Image (cartoon, helix red, strand yellow):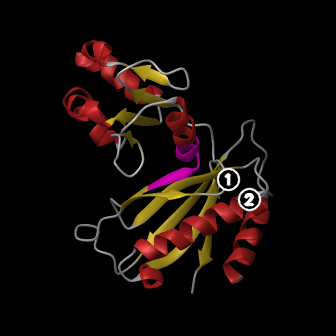
Amino acid sequence: MELKEELKKALTELRKNKERKFDQTVDLIINLQKFNTKKDTLNVFISVPHKIKEKRIAAFLEAKNPVVDTITQDEFKKYNDKKALKKLVKKYDFFIAQASLMPKVATTFGRVLGPAGKMPSPQLGIVMNVDDKTIAPLKDKVNKSVKIRTKEASIKVPIAKQSMEDGKIVENIISVFNALIKELPRDKENIKNLEVKFTMTKPIKIKVR
């Protein structure tokens, strides 16, 4: 309950900042403690109740699909060219793949998708069967999830857009916070504090004790 109030207060403060000409992203920064980033790694997808933004999604599938931008196996050779490959990775936020194509996806696209953290993942993004009934809900799920990957003791996640109601932003933050506690080796003990900011503002610190 306390956290909810603190977050609401922080958002009220952030909204006092100068208006920008674009819809700023609301970033959540989770600062960890007593957490060894070499030994304890996190790589999880967390679902949030409210869609953050419409992600640009591409799919590696055996056949074209009307619901999503599709790259079929015949088109893979186009991406032997590093420039084309880099352009593709920049253009899309998220990639999904048909399981049968995964080995080929790994060899053709892995060298760029891997380091960018956009490789299709078994947790969210690899599909066995492809039909309209699978792809549409999967896209929805992708749009309502955030990826948390620990490289350092501070995790920054885009959690909402400024145009969202405060109540919805708070619900997104709390759902990430609660899910993260379950994933951390020492749950709440591992979280030093949270910070919330808009794209162009300074962060506001929030205690979680």
- The residue type indicated by label 1 comes to His
Judging depth in this view, the residue of 21 and 27 nearest the camera is 27
Q: Decide: is 47 above or below 77.
A: below
Which residue position is annotated with label 2? 168
Q: Quadrant of residue 82?
A: top left
Which residue position is annotated with label 1? 50
- Which quadrant holds the N terminus? bottom right
Residue 196 falls inside the magenta stretch = no
- The residue type indicated by label 2 comes to Lys
Q: Position of residue 6 (x, y in %)?
A: 71, 76
Neighbour tally class for label 1: few under 14, some 14-19, many 20 plus, Cα within 10 Å: some
Residue 190, label in figure: none
Q: Are marks 2 and 1 in contact (CB under 8 Å)?
A: yes
Q: Decide: is 69 above or below 120.
A: above
Q: Quadrant of residue 167?
A: bottom right
Residue 142 falls inside the magenta stretch = yes
Neighbour tally class for label 2: few under 14, some 14-19, many 20 plus, Cα within 10 Å: some
Residue placed at 37% from the left, 25% from the top? 61
Q: Secondary structure at mark 2?
A: helix
Q: Is residue 157 left or right of residue 148?
A: right
Count of numbered badges drawn on the protein: 2
Residue placed at 71% from the left, 41% from the top? 23
- Which quadrant holds the C terminus? bottom right
CA gap between label 2 and label 1 equals 7 Å
Q: Secondary structure at mark 1?
A: loop
Magenta stretch in the rendered image? 140-147
